[in-house]
Amino acid sequence: MKTVIIGGVAGGATAAARLRRLDEGASITIYERSGFISYANCGLPYYIGGEIADDGELTLQTPSSFKERFNVDVYVRHEVTAIDAAAREVEVRDLATGRSFKDCYDKLIIATGAKPALFGIEGADTRGVFTLRTVEDTLAIKQFIVQNKPRTAIIAGGGYIGIELAENLVRAGIAVTILQRPDRLLQPLDYDMACLVAAKVRQAGAEVVFSASVKAFESRPQGGVLCRLADGSARPCDMAVAALGVQPDSALAAAAGLKTGIKGAICVDEHMRTSSPDIYAVGDAVQVTNFVTGGDALISLAGPANKQGRIAADNICGIPSRYEGSQGSSVIKVFDMTVATTGINSKTARDAGIDCDSVVLSPLSHAGYYPGARPMTMKVLFERGTFRLLGAQIVGGEGVDKRIDVLATAIRAGMKGTELTGLDLAYAPPYSSAKDPVNMAGYMIENIAGGLVKQFGWQDIAALSADDGAFLLDTRTPAEYAAGHVAGFVNIPLDELRSRMGELPADKRVYVMCHSGLRSYLACRILSQRGFDCCNFSGGYAFARAVLAGGGMPAALFECGMERS
């Protein structure tokens, strides 16, 4: 059995290693267009910023080490230019010599990955303009910085690569501006959670501009780059990076007549087999099933690519492995903040016709009495009525990654949000609280399911301020209230509420707010048992303030000592 693999980064290298473990006698060949194999895409920005000092650390294997360990023939700087499915042949060009030749296969795995999406931007080849996808891209950016010592940089795009690169350029002493066409950074996040990220990026010293669409790059006569925007304005900089996202690198498959789907991605079945029975495809080039919605999706992440490579190898060797879909679990470092997601966000739920609700909480990373506890903001999404878990987003510091992994596992297991209360999670003061944040999210969903509490969100505040049928109540302390509050909310501290019931109108619905949502929940329980119709503010004042700081709420809604931006 001879298997040829096109692409040797994540999915391709994993497939090759798995094939060898299953079949010592198989002939396995990898053709990789770049000069490197088995490299860590996600680590590339950190070499630019100096966090990773040795460029050798970016590659997990070399062609020679892969040959020694796995007896796989690896050819770098060899580009497969055509696939003949009927003849079971590929045409290959040696990029060093220009020589072309053909190679035959019994089974073929396409692992061509994704390429930077430029969306028709002109001048992307201008000197000082870069993309970041390969080790060569990384080395070119690093060399440019060392040789030219740029003082300013523009990053077009605020996704994972754009944010990571912004951090590392700031680390290198460069003033960074992120130009983002959508209204938020990190599109997998809901808008309110993305506001927390934007606030952090700005606090760290980078400028963030939304609704800014780059149309062209051009050289400046005095040196550097000029970024021309769709609104007619222009911004100068010393260097620029187009980090607008990626699209499947699937032209080779399409030319071979393989079935394609979203944005030209290669269609595969659950065994990673394409429309040609002897050709498999894995990684960022393929269309997958969204595990939560069941619909088609493009999810470009290293974890799924590696799993798919293993599954393709299994099936080639007669093991009927299945890929059950991607749920987009991811984590990213944003300066000293950690941002993590799993499952779907609110927009994806709406687009899929799913009636989505959520809870927002701000627990500490571990027991508050143990030194070093840091708050995190968690948003857990679930389906109304069924309470099926749909997704989660967490922004914070220590402990974010382990909570998102618990929630990702719960989603994969098909758990309901109400079942999070029963998870038996490890506890010691340096690591967690006796009621872990994941358990707390479950308790909140359980309260909603049991009718013990109703919620309202930051999107509702503006309308409530003008609603004569609403009474707005802030249950924080007088000092907290004086330091800043939402306009129209009356301050009655929680501990005084029972003795001041007469100040609340019995004929109006009471909308209750506190700092994080706990005291307002307690207030709602007191009020509801005394006949009041009341709603608890999801996330609390601190969450509303963070949305404001990220640009999501008008400053006019806030009064007193509120810092406005």
Image: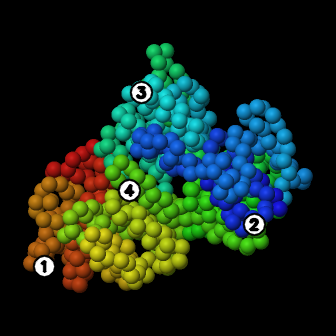
Cα separation between marks 3 and 4: 28 Å
Tag 2 secondary structure:
loop
Of the pair 71 and 217, the residue shown nearer to us: 71
> Which dot marks residue 498?
1
| For residue 469, side relative to residue 401 (left or right) | left
Which is nearer the N-term, disc 3 or disc 1?
3
Tag 1 secondary structure:
helix
Q: Nearer the viewer, mark 4 or mark 1?
A: 4
Vertical placement of 167 versus 218: above or below?
below
Residue denoted by label 3: 150
Which is nearer the N-term, disc 3 or disc 2?
2
Which is nearer the N-term, disc 3 or disc 4?
3
Which residue is at the far right?
87
Cα separation between marks 4 and 2: 41 Å
Residue denoted by label 2: 23
Which is nearer the N-term, disc 4 or disc 2?
2
> Which dot marks residue 338?
4
Q: Quadrant of residue 260?
A: bottom right
Tag 3 secondary structure:
loop
Position of residue 159 measured from the top left corner of the image (x, y, whole percent): 48, 47
